[in-house]
Image: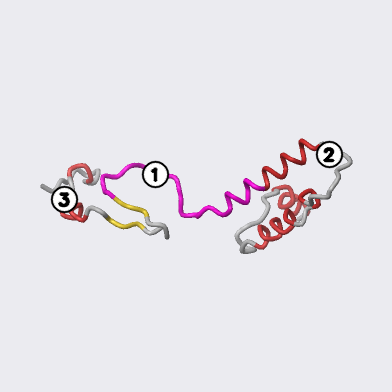
């Protein structure tokens, strides 16, 4: 039993799906309340370069967080013309694609059945 608890502690996975983003919210609050972001903060063991780098990375992280999450990696090209609107919904430009016959020969099962 003790080994299982050590395994769970050692994972270090951060927040999971079960907490619903509470961990991310706590992390965000902790970064926002950091003394390093206070303009009057004078670091004793931290160089000014490191402090500036932290502030720069914090700004970049906030900018990334503001971007819409609907942008994703494309998983290949299609021959269908589409347009992505600002609310991340896809609008078909080419409606004639639905009338094109599908080449069944390439989609037939491994048993060798072909539909002509």
Q: Residues within 10 Å of mark 1 (few under 14, many from 20)?
A: few
**Mark 1 or 2, nearer chain start:** 2
Q: Secondary structure at mark 2?
A: loop
**Mark 3 or 2, nearer chain start:** 2
Q: Secondary structure at mark 3?
A: loop
Q: Is residue 65 left or right of residue 83?
A: right
- Judging depth in this view, the residue of 11 and 60 nearest the camera is 60
Which picture quadrant has residue 103? top left
Give the magenta range: 59-81
Q: Secondary structure at mark 1?
A: loop
In space, the residues marked 1 and 2 are separated at their CA atoms by 44 Å
- Judging depth in this view, the residue of 37 and 77 nearest the camera is 37
Q: Which marked residue is nearer to the observer: mark 1 or mark 2?
A: 2
Residue 75 - label: 1
In space, the residues marked 1 and 3 are separated at their CA atoms by 22 Å
Q: Which residue is mark 3?
A: 100
In the image, residue 6 lies at what x, y percent?
Answer: 76, 50
Q: How many marks?
A: 3
- Judging depth in this view, the residue of 113 and 16 nearest the camera is 16
In the image, residue 95 lies at what x, y percent?
Answer: 21, 56
Q: Residue at x 68, y 52 (%)?
A: 14
């Amino acid at each position: 039993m003790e080994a299982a608890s050590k395994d769970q502690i050692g994972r270090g996975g951060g927040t999971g799906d079960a907490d619903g983003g509470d961990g991310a919210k706590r992390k965000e609050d902790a970064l926002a309340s950091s003394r390093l972001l206070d303009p009057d903060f004078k670091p004793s063991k931290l160089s000014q370069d490191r402090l500036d780098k932290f502030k720069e990375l914090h700004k970049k992280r906030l900018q990334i967080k503001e971007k819409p999450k609907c942008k994703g990696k494309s998983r290949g090209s299609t021959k269908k013309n589409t347009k992505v609107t600002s609310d991340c919904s896809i609008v078909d430009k080419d409606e004639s694609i639905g009338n094109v016959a599908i080449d069944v020969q390439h989609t037939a099962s491994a048993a060798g059945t072909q539909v002509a």
